Amino acid sequence: MNWRRDELAHFGDQITWLDQADASATFDRAMLLTSKSHYGLDPAAVTDIERLDVDEPSPEANAWLSRRIGNSMVFVVFDRHQVCRMGGAFFVRY
C-alpha cells in the first residue's frame, strides 16, 4: 500500500519518488547514520549535529532550518521502499 504517495500526490512534481533500487540504496545509506542505542542520529557518524528545541512550527524555526538546508535536495526516507526527494525550500515550507 502506498498511502504516503497517495497522501502527498497533491504536491505533484514537487516530490519525486525514487525507484525501488534507489530507494533501497538510500535507505541503507541513511541507516549508516542512525544510532544503534537511541532514536536519532549517531554522533560518531554525524559530527555536526545541531538541535533547536521547539514545540510547534514557527517562522523562527523555519528560518533556522532554511539557513541550514538552503536550496539543496532533501531526501525523506520513510522505509526501505518509500523514499522521496524534494527541494530544501519546499521541505521547509511544507
Image (tube, grey):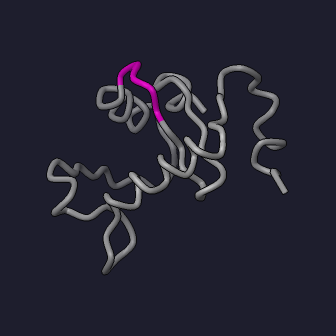
Q: What x and y, as percent, mark residue 81? A: 65, 54
Of residues 19 and 64, the one nearer the viewer is 19
Does 59 lie within the magenta span?
no
> Could you tell me residue 61's position as x and y percent?
40, 38
- Nearest the eye: 72 or 57: 72
**Residue 46: percent from the left, percent from the top?**
21, 53
Question: Which residue is depicted at the point 66% across and 35% down?
Answer: 17
**Image position of 14 with respect to 92: above or below:** above
Instruction: Look at 30% across and 26% down and name the residue there.
Output: 67
Quarter of the picture holding the N terminus: bottom right
Q: Is residue 58 left or right of residue 1?
A: left
Q: Where does the magenta region start and end?
A: 70-74
Foreground pick, 35 / 80: 80
> Which secondary structure is most common in the magenta stretch?
loop
For the point 75% across and 48% down, the residue is 4
Furthest-front residue in this view: 21
Q: Is 15 displayed left or right of 92 in the figure? A: right
Check residue 71 for magenta coloring: yes
Q: Is residue 92 above or below residue 32?
A: above
- Residue 55: image location, x then y, percent: 46, 56
Residue appearing at x 61%, y 33% in the figure = 94
- Nearer to me, 89 or 63: 89
Tally the numbered discs. 0
